[in-house]
Amino acid sequence: MATLSSPPTTRPGPGRPATPAPTDAERAAALRRMKALALGLLLAMAVVFLVAFALQGRYPWLEYVRAAAEGGLVGALADWFAVTALFRHPLGLKIPHTAIIPTRKDAIGASLSGFVRDNFLSADIIKAKLDSVDVARKAGTWLASPTGAERVAKEGAAVIRGAFTVLNDEDVQTVVEGMVRRHLVDPPWGPPVGRLAERVFDAGHHHSLVDLLVDRASDWVAANYQTVTRLVTERSPSWVPSFANDLVGDKVYLELSKFVAAVQADPNHKVRGSIDAYLKDLARDLQHDPVMIARAEGIKAQVLGDPEVRHLAGRTWATVKKALLEAVSDPHSELHHRFTTAVRDFGARLVEDEELAGKVNAWVGDAAGYVVTTYRHEIAGVIEDTVARWDAEETSRKIELQVGRDLQFIRLNGTVVGALAGLAIFAIAQAVFGG
């Protein structure tokens, strides 16, 4: 059975720290003392009534005492019955409309739920309260402080570690693999690569790469005279004299050097034009030529086959997981430093930037209003459902511990007010009809 629990502390006032709330044992002791006081006063009224009733014939002024004691006794008994009837059947007698809390617990919960829903869970009330609080600047002041930023970073790190603890590596790997297949493997490569390449080639962005390749070719030729002449010698007939091979090798090397130098020096060289034409044709073929598109798909299949995709997904997740865990676990890491700095900067902006603070306050108010308007019945229903799960007798006992001591003042007041009322009624009657 679910039971009520006492709050751990009382709400602190301005400049006053929170103090521990009384325990159930302390509340029970205070309730017993108040019950004893109320009962003692009731018994005192009964004794005074009996004495005054017995002696009023001898001492007529005791009639006033008797009337006061009689009124106090009636008031004390009536209020004892009323207070007791809230929590149990008086004297164990199952009188109708007694033991109200245990017998009507669910109805009380439903009424309380409706009261909270209709009077507190209103978008206008919530927005008005949030506007008066100025959530943005209060949050900004806290976030801009070192303590607040560190707390946010610490809690964020705990969330990340908790998420990695809960997440199953195989499940995440499957998700990553599915994303790779959906966005990288399944779509054809040829047309999008061709469109991108066509824009690059039309804009001339590839010329720098061509320049680099020509420069590297020139450097290679300059450094490989022996390689060029040896290749000429190896490919010439065996009957050709060696001096002829040397002459031919020198001539080939010289012409090759001149050719590369000419290509390097002339940005409008025919070779460069041929390269441009070839690349642009390749870009168009990747978009429109079925044979070239099929070749691109074949290359994709070789690079990203099933084993490769799964291996890529596994390595990606393992790398991300390791890097994040190391970063969030190290308070001196670059990630931690940047995150806390970003939090402090955002907090400072919330304090200093009125426009941003206004937007945040408006967003918070709208979000709270939407939640309250959309889920007010569900939120209030928590009260009704919670009360319905409580044990009736335990609920009655707990509530009596919370408010029973104050209710005993009703009995004390009833005794005093009853005595005064009885005395007043008797005095007026005597004045009017007493002769």
Image (spheres, grey):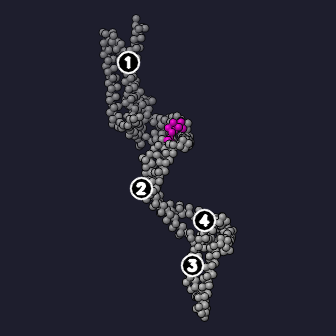
Tell me the distance, in whole angstroms, between the alpha carbons under discs 4 and 1: 93 Å
Report, in whole angstroms, how far the alpha carbon at label 2 lies from the one at label 1: 76 Å
The first of marks 4 and 1 along the sequence is 4
Q: Amino acid at mark 3?
A: Ala
Residue type marked 1: Ala
- Find disc 4 in the rendering and name its residue: 186
Q: Is residue 184 visible?
A: yes
Residue 301 against residue 377 in the figure, above or below:
below
Nearest the eye: 223 or 351: 223
* Residue stretch rendered in magenta on the structure: 125-137
Q: Nearer the viewer, mark 3 or mark 4?
A: 3
- Residue at mark 1: 419
Residue 231 appears left or right of 31:
right
Give the CA distance from mark 1 to mark 3.
Answer: 124 Å
Q: CA distance from mark 3 to mark 2?
A: 51 Å
Say whether disc 4 or disc 2 marks the residue closer to the N-terminus: 4
Residue annotated with mark 3: 222
> How many C-alpha atoms fall within 10 Å of the one at disc 1: few (<14), some, or many (≥20)?
many
